[in-house]
Amino acid sequence: MQIKTQRDGETLAVLLTGELDHHSAAPLRVELDALLGDRTIRCLALDLCGVTFMDSSGLGVVLGRYKLMKERGGSVRIQGASRPVERILKMAGVYALLGQQDAERGKGHV
Amino acid sequence: MFDNEMHVSFLGVSQNESFARMVAAAFASQLNPTIEELTDIRTAVSEAVTNAIIHGYSGMRGMVGMDCAIEGRNFTVTIRDEGRGIPNVPLAMQPFYTSVPNLERSGMGFAVMEAFMDSVTVESEVGRGTTVIMKKEIAAVGCDE
């Protein structure tokens, strides 16, 4: 799993590329949390357009970051999920939890 | 008697999760599944193998067995570990339930398996291990499609 980031004001945009499973979730979590150590970040914008596979371990990463950002009064946004990835996110009610109407496709921030 | 079958076993480490789902999908490919059906199989296998590694062995060294079989249009995959076992299978299968909240698990593993496969059967004995049997019928696709 590769990550590419871009800071824009209080938003940290993160483009994820690769397969997001239990194996790749652990280093991704460490990397994201190191970036989110900067408490001036208020919005984490995850662009999943490069994620070719995701299972429930990926959900754990997203839900964990949501919890982290919520604790500081911030937010998480998701976009670019492919149909299979979107299906898993919807199963767990992630879009509703994040306050997003639905999956946002198309080009990301990064 | 199955039309075709294969058996593989691998060390229960996270590096082998992608190996397991790729092998299962490659074997199922002979039924000419759609991309979506293949993704369903890959995802369900990934969930079951991850469970074997995280919950079955939880850091212990152990082998995970995977059997795949084809009978007509039906694909069956069985994932087996000889780990700790699940004390309460119906509870473990409830969406959002996780026995390891500190590990940031979503608790959606079994729910994903059930959503993506036609049937999921879990046999488990504490101290002996867990076997997950998942079946999926692969729809026949016309030759001209």
Image (cartoon, helix red, strand yellow):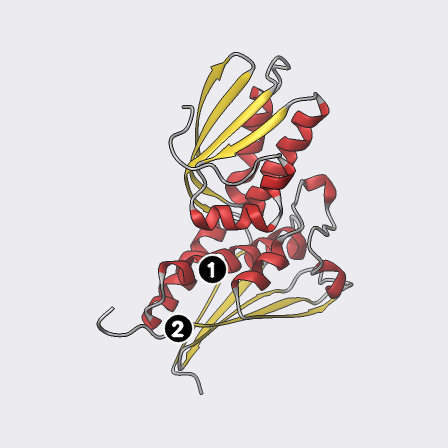
Mark 1 residue crowding within 10 angstroms, few (<14) / some (14–19) / many (20+): many
- Nearest-to-viewer mark from 1 and 2: 2
- Give the numbered dot on residue B40: 1
Mark 2 residue type? Ala
- Give the numbered dot on residue A2: none
Q: Earlier in the sequence, mark 1 or mark 2?
A: 1
* Labels 1 and 2 share a subunit: yes
Q: Nearer the viewer, residue B97 or A23?
A: B97
Mark 1 residue type? Asp
Q: Nearer the viewer, residue B49 or A92?
A: A92
At a point 55% along the width and 57% down the height, the residue shown is: B49
Q: Is residue B24 left or right of residue B128?
A: left
Q: Quadrant of the C terminus of chain A?
A: top left
Q: Residue furthest front?
A: A101
Q: Is residue A102 above or below residue A70?
A: below
Q: Is residue B39 left or right of residue B133?
A: left
Work out whether residue A54 can be spotted.
no
- Give the numbered dot on residue B139: 2
Q: Residue furthest left?
A: B144
Check the residue under mark 2 and report the chain it is in.
Answer: B
Q: Nearer the viewer, residue B110 or A77?
A: A77
Q: Quadrant of the N terminus of chain A?
A: top left
**Residue A34 locus on image (x, y percent):** 58, 21
Check the residue under mark 1 and report the chain it is in.
Answer: B
At a point 34% along the width and 66% down the height, the residue shown is: B29
| Secondary structure category for the residue under label 1 | helix
Mark 2 residue crowding within 10 angstroms, few (<14) / some (14–19) / many (20+): few
Q: Quadrant of residue B78?
A: bottom right
At a point 40% along the width and 82% down the height, the residue shown is: B72
Work out whether residue B117 can be spotted.
yes
At a point 73% along the width and 65% down the height, the residue shown is: B89
Evaluate if marks 1 and 2 touch, with contact meaning CB atoms under 8 Å apart: no
